[in-house]
Amino acid sequence: MIGRLRPEAATALAAAFFVAVLNLAFWRQLFATVAPRNPYELLFVAALVVVAFCCLVLFFGAFAVPGIFKPAMSLFLLASAAVAYFTNEYGVAIDGDMVRNVFLTNAAEAADLITLKLVWYVVILGGLPTLLLWTCTITYRTFWQEVWFRAKATTVLLAAIVLLAFPFAQGITSVFREHRILLHVFMPLNYLAALADYVRPHLRSHAIASVPLGQAAHKGGAWSGRSGRSLTVLVIGETARAANFSLNGYDRETNPLLSKVPDLINYTSAFSCGTATAQSLPCMFSGLGRSGQTGPRTIQREGLLQILQRAGFSVLWRENQGGCAGVCKGVPIEQLERAGTRALFELGESRDENLVKGLQDKIDAMQGDSVIVLHMMGSHGPAYYKRYPADFERFQPACRESQFSRCQRSEIINGYDNTIVYTDYVLAQVIELLRVNDKRGLPSTMLYLSDHGESLGENNMYLHGLPYALAPDVQKHVPMLLWVSPQMQAEFQIDTACLERRRHEPLSHANFFHSVLGLLDVETKDYTRELDIFAGCRRGRMAHPAR
Ligand SMILES: [Zn+2]
């Protein structure tokens, strides 16, 4: 018998053990990421240590109930010791995919992973503290005394977290945003979140059945009598804000190539329906707009790409980023660079030119009328400098840190503007490729739309993801560009002069879904003519299509 402990002492000891021992890999990586150089940055790391400790005390405190605390803590200790082994040994990060892999691992594969070292990890780092815990007696107060004490302790801990985190809020946001993977290393929250990620869709598929859309979707009259193929390229931008496109009047030359493309239509008043990729993508592809945005429900609902497939189009999603937020379900996906590489902290530089490289081969290999989605890495921050090759560093000096506190605001903006110059180049390349295909008899269209904007220091705000109602326009006003090849204009009776005249009308992500259906003349009950930018701009027999 070691002794008697109050529950708060036991939780504090457990939290200290997690911070100091089981989470060593986390601190090592954090230290390498931040690479503190001055007292401010050292304080930043120190504050994070204390914040992590307070969070763990709060978390473990929730289990400090007679009959639950010891079994629960034993599980956390043993599981964390095993996970610590895999993190240290293989550098794996724990996420939902990893848990899926664990459940899919067969006995033979599992046997390969069980080494003597793993056993030692579990025995020493998990077994010993568990043993110590069971030899202690936890002495709880009476129920109301315990409630009152916990209420006071929780208040103090929360206040400490806020006070310590607040001065470093900007640093914390930029470090964890750029190095999201750090969140997959912090125990035990990493594997608990991963487990939840893994389990959630299983629960959801019972709760909300996937809503099929456009079951009777089919190609309309514009397609009758056609024999050749057609090509539509939808480019989904990342973090590009309209304000920094010289096409929209920005005073720096960020669109040197696109500004020379004849017949390019630049929409000047397009607004996103979210301020983060995970909100915007489902919104763009569901056609529901902001009103229909209900998180998981939108993801479960089928969308544009599934309707197009049902209407007979070949669809391909080329991914140069972290994923399609559920909108490409059932669509062939080509992952250009594995954004979620398992090796820790290897940040891919995923250049967007890769989306154009090999694109012709894809076009040639596809059958019939094709729709290709290019999902860009775009201007994803805070490491803007990683998004473009050296030749595109037009604006100098550019911030070459992901910690904004180390750069001047002007350097951050330079870095961001360089990403736009590079996006300009990539989009111009896509259009050039489509122009060549058009000359070879393949009518084609490119529609580019960014998922959301970005704050670049206006009112001291950076990055994006603010709640929609609070977010400034720079996070919501997005560039939108349309290029329709001459043959496409002729065959589908698209009046580009009319489109050009109407390019200043207010638009949103909701228009994306209905406009693509309209452009491709897909007849389905899910189409709303009022939201189709092409609706009033068709010539001849398509001017008033019967729907
Ligand atoms: Zn995004």
Image (spheres, rainbow, N blue to C red):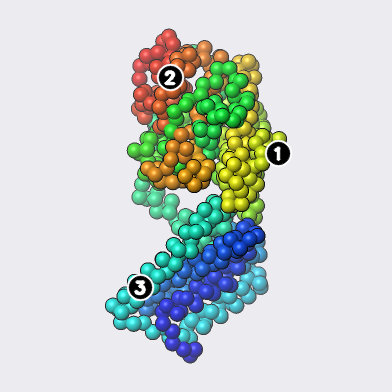
Do tag 1 and tag 3 residues touch (Cβ < 8 Å)?
A: no
The quarter of the picture where residue 215 lies is: top left
| Residue placed most toward the observer, 283 or 518 | 283
Q: Residue at (51%, 68%) from the top-left corner?
A: 50
Circle 3: is it few (<14), some (14-19), or many (20+) Cα within 10 Å? Answer: few
Do tag 1 and tag 2 residues touch (Cβ < 8 Å)?
A: no
The amino acid type, in three-letter code, at marker 2 is Arg
Query: Eyeballing the image, is 494 above or below 430?
Result: above
The amino acid type, in three-letter code, at marker 1 is Ala
Query: Eyeballing the image, is 457 above or below 31?
Result: above
Task: State the SS at label 3.
Answer: helix
Estimate the spatial distance between the alpha carbons at disc 1 and disc 3, rounded to whole Å.
55 Å
Q: Residue at (52%, 44%) from the top-left corner?
A: 457
Do tag 2 and tag 3 residues touch (Cβ < 8 Å)?
A: no
Q: Residue at (60%, 20%) from the top-left corner?
A: 261
The amino acid type, in three-letter code, at marker 3 is Lys
- The answer to whether residue 234 of the structure is visible from this angle is no
Q: Which mark is residue 390?
A: 1
Q: Position of residue 508 (x, y in %)?
A: 41, 31
Mark 2 lies on residue: 502
| Residue placed most toward the observer, 363 or 164 | 164
Mark 3 lies on residue: 152
Q: Position of residue 411 (x, y in %)?
A: 61, 43
